Amino acid sequence: MRILHTMLRVGDLDKSLDFYTRVLGMQLLRRRDYPDGKFTLAFVGYGPEDTHPALELTHNWDTSQYTLGNAYGHIALGVTDIRAKCEAIRQAGGKVVREPGPMKHGTTVIAFVEDPDGYKVELIEQSTQKD
């Protein structure tokens, strides 16, 4: 078994696709409208779905905003130069909500950014990760 994807409900699919593709550098892997159900599914990720996990962005056409539950944590991405990545995200219009620095009670360097719906994305500095 392996993780295939994680699903997030998004209020504005175009804004979310822009954030995950242009700001975070993912690729749009596939997108499909379901007119009878009034929703669209868009899958984004860093590689083909047969070998890489994906993020499913679900846009229900009649819902423009969601209340984030308090059980949700974050999505985590490995990066090699966290400070440069945060600056690139900021320059692309992304929102850095926790600047790079060691995690509490540890030494791992992390930062957090926020997507257009308020979902948190953690950046974790890793020396061998490809950005």
Image: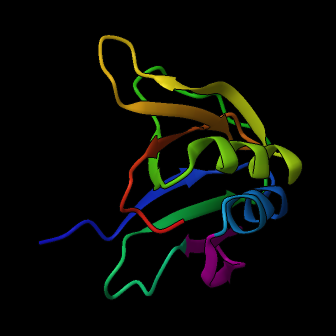
**Residue 9's x, y, as percent?**
60, 50
Res. 65 image quadrant: top right
Instruction: Measuring from the top left, give residue 130's x and y in whole percent.
Output: 47, 68
Q: 97 or 80, which lies in front? A: 80
Q: Main secondary structure of the magenta part?
A: strand
- Would you place residue 20 above or below residue 46 in this image? above
Q: Residue furthest top?
A: 105
* Total numbered circles: 0
Q: Is residue 65 left or right of residue 74?
A: right
Q: Which quadrant of the view contains residue 13? A: bottom right
Position of 96 with respect to 131 (left or right) is right
Residue 7 lies, with reference to residue 43, above or below; the image says above
Task: Find the residue positioned furthest to the left.
Answer: 1
Q: Specify whether residue 33 is painted magenta.
A: yes
Q: Residue at x 72, y 78 (%)?
A: 35
Residue 15 located within the stretch drawn in magenta: no
Residue in view at x 47 percent, y 57 percent: 7
The answer to whether residue 125 is left or right of residue 17 is left
- Which is more toward the observer, 49 or 7? 49
Q: Where the C terminus falls, by quadrant?
A: bottom right
Which range of residues does the magenta coloring cover? Answer: 26-44
Image quadrant assignment for residue 90: top right
**Residue at figure coordinates x 48%, y 32% from the top left:** 110
Q: Position of residue 89 (x, y in %)?
A: 76, 49
Residue 68: x %, y % from top left? 58, 28
Regarding residue 93, the answer to whether it shows in the image is no
Relative horizontal placement of residue 81, taking residue 95 as reference (left or right): left
Q: Quadrant of the N terminus?
A: bottom left
Viewer-proximal residue, 116 or 36? 116
Residue 70 visible to the viewer: yes
